[in-house]
């Protein structure tokens, strides 16, 4: 089951069901099953506090993902800073929804075992992100 939660009172995603469907397609395409995936949309400061508390890092980030997957059942909590996604969309001259989907996909790809610690891993992950962004309609 995929659920969306909001830690921001003035933000809500229109057409939630379309985003959820896209993540389901991704998981199915990768041969995985949906466990319990929670997307929590929050502010920069909310995510900064989590980054400090859980990862001992003192900087803003667009996403933090906590993986609870077992075998092919994909589960986890994904915290997304709406502030950061908005700023990134402006920086990269992208639509907000495009950048939001990119971050949502990126986190799930981590749950599937894709990493971005070195050049080759980043290249592979970027190709996967682009594949799914092109697959999903806006």
Image: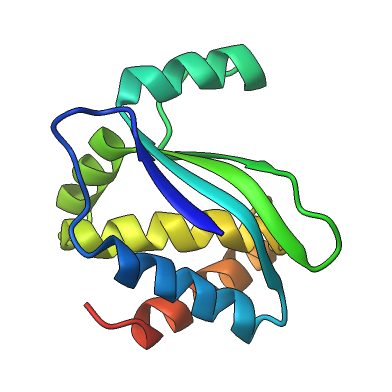
> x, y percentage for residue 4?
40, 48
Residue that appears at 70% across and 60% down: 74
Q: Quadrant of residue 53?
A: top right
Q: Quadrant of the C terminus?
A: bottom left
Q: Quadrant of residue 21?
A: bottom left
**Up-down relation of residue 75 to residue 56 (above or below):** below
**Up-down relation of residue 36 to residue 42 (above or below):** below
Q: Quadrant of the N terminus?
A: bottom right
> x, y percentage for residue 23?
48, 69
> x, y percentage for residue 67?
70, 45
Q: Quadrant of residue 133?
A: bottom left
Residue that appears at 41% across and 66% down: 20
Residue that appears at 15% across and 59% down: 93
* Res. 23 visible in picture: yes
- In the foreground, 115 or 75: 75
Q: State left or right for residue 118 relative to residue 78.
A: right
- In the foreground, 7 or 120: 7
Q: State left or right for residue 84 relative to residue 14.
A: right
> x, y percentage for residue 73?
76, 63
């Amino acid at each position: 089951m995929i659920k969306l939660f909001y830690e921001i009172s003035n933000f809500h995603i229109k057409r939630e069901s379309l985003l959820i469907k896209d993540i389901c397609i991704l998981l199915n395409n990768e041969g995985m099953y949906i466990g319990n995936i929670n997307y929590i949309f929050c502010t920069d400061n909310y995510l900064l506090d989590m980054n400090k508390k859980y990862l001992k890092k003192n900087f803003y980030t667009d996403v933090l993902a906590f993986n609870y997957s077992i075998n092919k059942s994909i589960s986890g909590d994904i915290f997304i800073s709406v502030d950061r996604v908005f700023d990134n969309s402006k920086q990269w001259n992208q639509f907000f929804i495009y950048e939001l989907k990119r971050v949502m996909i990126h986190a799930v790809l981590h749950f599937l075992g894709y990493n971005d610690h070195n050049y080759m891993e980043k290249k592979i992950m970027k190709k996967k992100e682009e594949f799914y962004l092109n697959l999903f309609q806006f």
